[in-house]
Amino acid sequence: MLRLRAAGAERPWRRLRGAALARGLLQPAAAGHGAAQRRQVAHFTFQPDPEPQKYGQTQKMNLFQSITSALDNSLAKDPTAVIFGEDVAFGGVFRCTVGLRDKYGKDRVFNTPLCEQGIVGFGIGIAVAGATAIAEIQFADYIFPAFDQIVNEAAKYRYRSGDLFNCGSLTIRSPWGCVGHGALYHSQSPEAFFAHCPGIKVVIPRSPFQAKGLLLSCIEDKNPCIFFEPKILYRAAVEQVPIEPYNIPLSQAEVLQEGSDVTLVAWGTQVHVIREVASMAKEKLGVSCEVIDLRTIIPWDVDTVCKSVIKTGRLLISHEAPLTGGFASEISSTVQEECFLNLEAPISRVCGYDTPFPHIFEPFYIPDKWKCYDALRKMINY
Amino acid sequence: MAVVVAAARFWGPSRGLGQAALLALRRPGARGLARSHPHRQQQQQFSSLEDKPQFPGASAEFIDKLEFIQPNVISGIPIYRVMDRQGQIINPSEDPQLPQEQVLKFYKSMTLLNTMDRILYESQRQGRISFYMTNYGEEGTHVGSAAALDNTDLVFGQYREAGVLMYRDYPLELFMAQCYGNVSDPGKGRQMPVHYGCKERHFVTISSPLATQIPQAVGAAYAAKRANANRVVICYFGEGAASEGDAHAGFNFAATLECPIIFFCRNNGYAISTPTSEQYRGDGIAARGPGYGLISIRVDGNDVFAVYNATKEARRRAVAENQPFLIEAMTYRIGHHSTSDDSSAYRSVDEVNYWDKQDHPISRLRRYLLGRGWWDDEQEKAWRKQSRKRVMEAFEQAERKLKPNPNLLFSDVYQEMPVQLRKQQESLSRHLQTYGEHYPLDHFEK
């Protein structure tokens, strides 16, 4: 449309015919209307960490490449390790397993039928037999058919058998969290369902470097682990990641930024949102924030969070998952038990609403930096 | 935006996945020595010159007559047996010709199990243990199949397979210890009675949820295949559990991933009160096998030799060819579902008596033994006395023992105890210091 009007400036009006005439008559969209047609940009800005120095040579990797690297290291080190799930053979719908089948063979990287309860049950069996099982559930939204196998079987295997049997060498990986347009069934963050289940570990990385180290720790951990991968970061998050294997410990939260006035806690993509909120708070309110990435949901690092709140007196927890029964409730409840007299304000939770994850309303649904900033402001002014 | 690209890659099935779809085509045809079918060769087979179906999803001819397939439930898959109900071998070429010692072991395992069942069922009635499940009528399915396996073959059971452990010489003391949840229980008192497990005898600990063991057994079989272990995995389940989604998942995975596994279904006529007529409408479980690509057979579960022969051959081929087998053993649950059940509420005493008196695996084997001159009434009397004495001794000993230390409530949730759980353990400890008199501490180890 814009091109035709420019042409019209050079040629007489009478040359436009038919469709061209119709097009020529159409006004280009006004600035306001045009903006409504374009889809939103992401609600966060990925903040890479500085290049790690102590793990040897690094390479620029995005999140899915860092996952591939971790899987590559695992299959190289551990001859019993196998990767399976829907569509992993050709490289996976998010390209996390590209190249691995060619490198390690079709008996080690293979597709399963479309059946999540089967994938997890099968994975448990491999682990019980003493081999390393890395199962992929294509979207966390589809993990629920496997809920029985995870909660009633995997989590309880060691306990119920008196430690005669276990499935500690099972790791389940699954894409997690909002992606801009995923709606009800491609956006969920189900960590709270699993937080209520003693016997498993649930881990969520914020970045490629974190993901590789945490995934390797999950794979090597002697307990069944669920590793949720923020899908919106698969391509968006890029940083220098060591080529060789390395481990980041589980059940240890990381203080990304020290501060004195308020503690901000999040995990996965939301860590980048609260980092920005911390900058906003410093700039606009002169408030000093301590930013914590929880990293492991269960068993979670109570000590690091409480130590921080004892110092700051204020806590804000944020996650995409719905408010009621979300994992922020557990953190809030524990912190008020342990740090009651240190609190200067009620603990704030900025979360998704108690609705299924909507499609077109996603920009309104997510706990973005403005909602977090507003909650923080209210806490400071309490 | 990178996100949009990633999304488009996923949401556009024709973009980027078309190539993969072609590569994923499987060559149709009979399964020979099982190997994964190679990719890429299907492209040469496409030919629009011939009027044959080209669909990747099925290997079949066209038909131009509208005909529905009628499921055949009137005359279903025949039931393989070796002995008649009087313990006579029907077809001598099917007699496994097992040595006397082994057949006596069959008999003694089944009868010892029966004796233990009677005593432990009674002990629940008397309030000594909380719960029990008997194996009456199904002893043949346990012992016949267990005998056909190697001792190191991994067993995944449901809950009515104690005879497998009995055949593998699991001590009575440990059966009892688990039922009593005493200090000797290898399971550390965590589960209800009959949830046995034994690492040395390769019997995976039982869990209550039904059919969950089925896909797990398949995974274990896959790992055994990769390890070139020359082992088979056997997975037991009832006809009721076979209705669960996990059963469907397990069958399909075993076939597609070419696992050396024997699926052993004990079709005993009831899932608690639900008869088979309300459990399925097809021809039982064996008929489902071919639908998944499983080699299948139906056997008389009350005929120890039939069970033995079928399991033996299935084991040989499962390991040699890396493929799954399905055995449906027809039998009858003579006892109640458990001590929480009174089956007279849903079936007639006459029906139960028929099976107990006319078609019982122990009776049939006894008649065989008597016929061979390998057993007689005197030995029977002596063995009954001896087995009962053994069971009673183990029972009394189990009763006297203490329960494990309450600290064992907290261990093995993870391999290492998490910090927060240790705090909870300490909290209980402190609580007991003040309120201990209200708890049965005297029965527990200090």
Image (spheres, grey):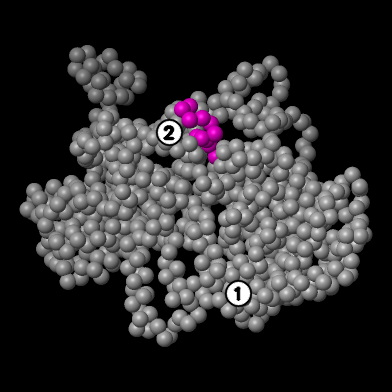
Left or right relative to B123: residue A136: left
Percent position of residue A148, x then y: 51, 57
Residue that label 2 marks: A76
Q: Is residue A79 above or below residue B264?
A: above
Which quadrant of the view contains residue B441?
A: bottom left
Chain part drawn in magenta: A102-112
Quadrant into which the N terminus of chain A falls: top left
**Label 2 vs label 1: CA separation?**
49 Å
Residue type indicated by callout 2? Ala
Quadrant into which the C terminus of chain A falls: bottom left
Percent position of residue A242, x then y: 29, 34
Residue that label 1 marks: B398
Q: Residue at x 38, y 52 (%)?
A: A202
Percent position of residue B309, x then y: 79, 48
Secondary element at tag 2: helix
Q: Residue at x 69, y 26 (%)?
A: B53
Q: Is residue B265 visible?
A: yes
Q: Is residue A119 visible?
A: no
Q: Residues within 10 Å of mark 2 (few under 14, many from 20)?
A: few
Percent position of residue A125, x then y: 55, 48
Q: Is residue B11 above or below residue A358?
A: above
Q: Is residue B416 magenta?
A: no
Which quadrant of the view contains residue A73?
A: top left
